[in-house]
Image (cartoon, coloured by chain):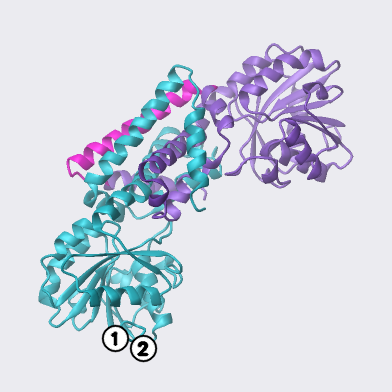
Chain colours: A purple, B cyan
């Protein structure tokens, strides 16, 4: 296998933060590879002006001839794209995605013919703000890139995608989709939902005048609430059955805290436990 | 009034992040002022080794002779210190505090004799980690420093504290204690409580193995959970009546989100609203 996984023509469907950063990373590492970007007209125009793409189009038919298709749109848009791929891609190709939930996408990918080998993927990399403007070629460096193959995925396809993401600086890690979606419900989807709900409650509660009386604490805690709404809507929707129990645990914890406050009992055990967990999290 | 507010001897009760940073800021701006630090033995030793203090003691009696006393311990400890000040301070002095809630402290300060003029204060400055080791002289630069005088506080005392904090680089702003505690319940205390509850739920939910599958989002959202537990326990306890209704609004928002998830309704309006509010918050 050549170091670029033998890919000569890569189609990226969705050229936002992740898709755009992927394009930049490929350009830097494999300057001879043709990169076709597919997105709305204004996004494609911006991406081309930034030098991210060899070609750009608004039509999913732009995947034709690609030997690697990367689905990097919001998850529900990726599901819709998967349905259309068999009629748009004639030969053999590997299809992967970068979505934050994996079971729904793997379920949809079961309908793909064997010539289109699907390898689910999720780079654990991001930024508070989305969009092609925030893209950067080093976004994936030293970041875990989870790969979730299905039972029907060939080892060759897995090895090629694994080598590809490693070449871009990431650390590939195979994980089953169920485990991925369960863990990420806690470590990513619940924090996002919480930060957004908090930002809405605080903003509605005190308005612009009150927001002036805030410091770095509110800014840090709500930073991810700046993320694109559509992306998180899809993530929550396609992982609702894992997210709901996690959310229930948070609601219970907040109700317990409320009960302690109302009865003048100390919250110190909760703050202590949180402080200990936070110390074990990489910053 | 001289530029240092005529203070010659400043006693700082509690030499953590805020008290320590205050000491460093005074040393830099007013090198001739004597700074007495009062805290646990290990904290006083560390603060002296770092060059923050002229003198250090574990005994609150160290406030004797000070013309400015700054209460910078956790709020409930400040309340206890206020009770003891009249017997420890013989002459006239100004007493201020840097606590994150103001009504409880102002209530306690009503018992002070007129020779001890109380001006409540709250610098809107902080850091994720507390302690003297995290202190720095520029912590207050360009930060709002809320002053909450009581009805019995003299204009002279207010002017002296105001000039003092301005000399340290902060921007003094008078606010009544009720408004302060209401607004800060939303912009500071609720975010802290939420971040800590989230960190506890996520840590308990997936453990160290699961925490490996997290990125900058969880790290940002839970950053303040690293703050000292005791400080936040006191803050929540002394502002429970404002914090509880704010917490109820968050619980309602999370329950509404749960209901939407369970019925496959979109969360996009919530994410959209949060994104708009977040854009209006300074970084």
Q: Is residue B70 left or right of residue A109?
A: left
- The answer to whether B258 is drawn above or below residue B283 in the figure is above
Residue drawn at (62%, 15%), measured in percent from left and top?
Answer: A107
Looking at the image, do the residues carrying marks 1 and 2 touch, with CB atoms under 8 Å apart? yes
Residue pictured at 20% horizontal, 84% vertical: B65
Quarter of the image where one finds residue A58: top right
Determine the residue positioned at 77% across, 43% down: A24
Residue A86 drawn at (x, y percent): 78, 13
Tag of residue A37 = none
Q: Main secondary structure of the magenta part?
A: helix
Residue B132 visible in this rendered orientation of the protein: yes
**In the image, which disc is placed on residue B8?**
1
In which quarter of the view is residue A161 placed?
top right
Which residue in the protein does label 2 denote?
Answer: B32
Picture quadrant of residue A260: top left
B196 in magenta: no
Q: Is residue A89 above or below residue B162?
A: above
Q: Distance between the residues labelled 1 and 2?
A: 8 Å
User: How many labels were placed on the picture?
Assistant: 2
Q: What stretch is highlighted in magenta?
A: A238-267
Image coordinates of residue B72 in percent, x first then y, are: 29, 66
Residue lying furthest right: A32
Q: Does residue A45 lie above or below B160 as drawn?
A: above
Residue closer to the observer: B133 or A74? A74
Q: In this view, does A241 lie above or below B42?
A: above
Query: Mark 1: few, some, or many residues within 10 Å (few <14, many ≥20)?
Result: some
Q: Mark 2 lies on which chain?
A: B
Would residue A7 be visible to someone looking at this image? no
- Disc 2 packing (10 Å; few <14; some 14–19; many ≥20): few
Residue B150, given in percent of the width and then of the height, sits at 19, 65
Residue depicted at x 80% and y 12%: A87
């Amino acid at each position: 296998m050549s170091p670029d996984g033998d890919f000569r023509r890569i189609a990226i469907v969705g050229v936002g933060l992740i898709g755009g950063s992927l394009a930049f990373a490929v350009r830097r590492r494999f300057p001879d590879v043709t990169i076709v970007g597919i997105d709305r007209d204004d996004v494609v125009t911006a991406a081309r002006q930034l030098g991210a793409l060899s070609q750009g189009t608004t039509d999913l038919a732009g995947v034709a001839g690609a030997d690697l298709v990367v689905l990097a749109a919001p998850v529900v848009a990726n599901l819709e794209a998967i349905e259309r791929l068999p009629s748009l891609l004639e030969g053999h190709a590997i299809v992967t995605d970068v979505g934050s939930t994996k079971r729904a996408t793997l379920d949809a990918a079961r309908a793909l013919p064997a010539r289109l080998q699907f390898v689910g993927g999720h780079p654990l990399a991001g930024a508070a703000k989305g969009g092609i403007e925030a893209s950067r070629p080093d976004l994936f460096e030293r970041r875990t890139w989870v790969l979730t193959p299905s039972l029907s995925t060939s080892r060759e396809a897995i090895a090629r995608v694994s080598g590809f993401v490693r070449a871009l600086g990431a650390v590939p890690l195979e994980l089953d989709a169920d485990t991925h979606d369960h863990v990420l419900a806690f470590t990513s989807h619940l924090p996002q939902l919480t930060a957004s709900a908090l930002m809405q409650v605080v903003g509605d509660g005190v308005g612009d005048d009150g927001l002036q009386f805030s410091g770095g604490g509110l800014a840090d805690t709500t930073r991810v609430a700046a993320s694109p709404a559509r992306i998180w809507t899809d993530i929550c929707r396609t992982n609702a059955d894992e997210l709901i129990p996690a959310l229930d645990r948070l609601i219970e914890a907040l109700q317990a805290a409320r009960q302690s406050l109302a009865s003048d009992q100390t919250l110190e055990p909760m703050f202590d436990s949180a402080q200990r967990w936070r110390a074990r999290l990489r910053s």
